[in-house]
């Protein structure tokens, strides 16, 4: 059937024949269906192209949207974590502040018990409204300054023992150790030990005397902050010089029995603004 053909003659506007072509008769008889099929095919191709393009674009935007949603969720989680961390940090910082306050109060109580001046006395003639707003940075600065101030004051306050021997003679009136008769005022404490053992400063300060001084024998005298002064007497040897700055715990001499002494020991004196006080008040700080 496909071998049958139909001749088609093309005539111009003058009626002359210009071209003759032959096409299969089956195509001529079914041109409507062929045309419809062609149109359908073209439409299907176009629809496919549009679908593919639309699907690709949709997938792209969907992917971008998913990434944005994931980023927002991550940011939300980070914000929640940061907030929780800040709250925890605030609580921890407040606990640290409370611990500092407690420590200062305990130190003040111990100082009062020993008849010594407090580090942070109560503020007199003061008042005003209390602000509820908390500025952590300012609080941190305040407590840093408080701790530094406390540390500086403690460094210059005589605390603890200059030697770990036993106390053989306490502060106050006692019998004359040479005659065992009569009573004399003992202005320090005597701590026993062996000749040559280390004698250490009980606080940071400046040496104002180092050498031989009458009944003290070889003695080191150190001035500290806030009117404190310590004296280390009967030394076999002094290891510091006048004008030298001393750190707490630094060795200043060696135990001996020079001056008015019945045997090897350290005579330790503590003065506050020139007044001699009992050193035992500051020997054990607990």
Image (tube, rainbow, N blue to C red):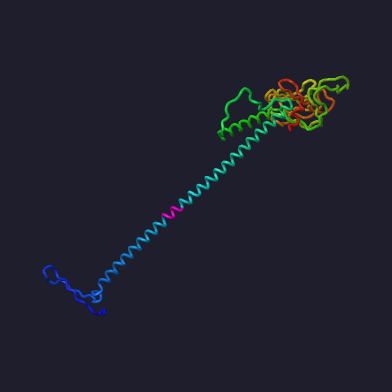
| Residue 64 highlighted magenta (yes or no) | yes
- Quarter of the image where one finds residue 179: top right
- Quarter of the image where one finds residue 255: top right
- Quarter of the image where one finds residue 228: top right
- 21 up-or-down from 151: above or below: below
- Who's the residue at 58% across and 33% down the image? 139
Where in the figure is residue 136, as x and y percent of width and height?
57, 35
Where in the figure is residue 245, as x and y percent of width and height?
68, 27
- 46 up-or-down from 218: above or below: below
Looking at the rendering, the stretch of residues picked out in magenta corresponds to 61-66
- 2 up-or-down from 191: above or below: below
- Who's the residue at 84% across and 27% down the image? 263
- Who's the residue at 34% across and 63% down the image? 47
* Number of marks: 0
In this orientation, which residue lies closer to the viewer: 185 or 199?
A: 185
In this orientation, which residue lies closer to the viewer: 112 or 242?
A: 112
Where in the figure is residue 205, as x and y percent of width and height?
69, 26
- In the displayed structure, does residue 155 sit left or right of residue 64? right
Q: Quadrant of the N terminus?
A: bottom left
What secondary structure predominates along the stretch shown in magenta? helix
Where in the figure is residue 270, as x and y percent of width and height?
75, 24
- In the displayed structure, does residue 131 sit left or right of residue 266? left
In this orientation, which residue lies closer to the viewer: 257 or 112?
A: 112
- In the displayed structure, does residue 67 sit left or right of residue 102? left
Q: Quadrant of the C terminus?
A: top right
Specify the farthest residue to the left.
14
In this orientation, which residue lies closer to the viewer: 30 or 27?
A: 30
- In the displayed structure, does residue 119 sit left or right of residue 133? right
| Residue 21 highlighted magenta (yes or no) | no
């Amino acid at each position: 059937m496909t071998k049958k053909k139909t001749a088609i003659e093309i005539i111009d506007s003058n009626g002359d024949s210009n071209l003759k072509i032959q096409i299969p008769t089956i195509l001529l008889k079914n041109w409507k269906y062929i045309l419809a099929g062609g149109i359908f095919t073209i439409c299907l191709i176009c629809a496919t192209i549009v679908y593919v393009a639309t699907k690709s674009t949709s997938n792209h935007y969907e992917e971008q949207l998913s990434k944005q949603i994931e980023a927002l969720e991550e940011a939300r989680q980070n914000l929640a974590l940061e907030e929780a961390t800040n709250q925890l940090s605030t609580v921890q910082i407040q606990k640290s502040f409370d611990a500092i306050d407690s420590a200062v109060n305990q130190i003040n109580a111990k100082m009062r018990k020993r008849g010594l001046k407090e580090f942070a006395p109560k503020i007199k003639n003061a008042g005003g409204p209390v602000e509820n707003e908390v500025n952590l940075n300012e609080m941190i600065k305040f407590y840093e300054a408080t701790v530094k101030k406390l540390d500086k004051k403690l460094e210059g306050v005589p605390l603890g023992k200059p030697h770990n021997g036993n106390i053989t003679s306490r502060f106050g009136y006692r019998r004359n150790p040479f005659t065992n008769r009569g009573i004399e005022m003992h202005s320090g404490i005597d701590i026993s030990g062996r000749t040559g053992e280390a004698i250490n400063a009980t606080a940071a300060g400046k040496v104002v005397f180092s050498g031989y001084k009458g009944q003290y024998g070889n003695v080191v005298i150190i001035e500290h902050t806030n009117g404190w002064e310590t004296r280390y007497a009967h030394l076999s040897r002094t290891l510091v010089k006048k004008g030298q700055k001393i750190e707490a715990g630094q060795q200043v001499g060696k135990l001996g029995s020079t001056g008015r002494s019945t045997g090897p020991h350290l005579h330790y004196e503590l003065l506050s603004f020139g007044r001699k006080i009992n050193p035992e008040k500051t020997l054990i700080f607990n």
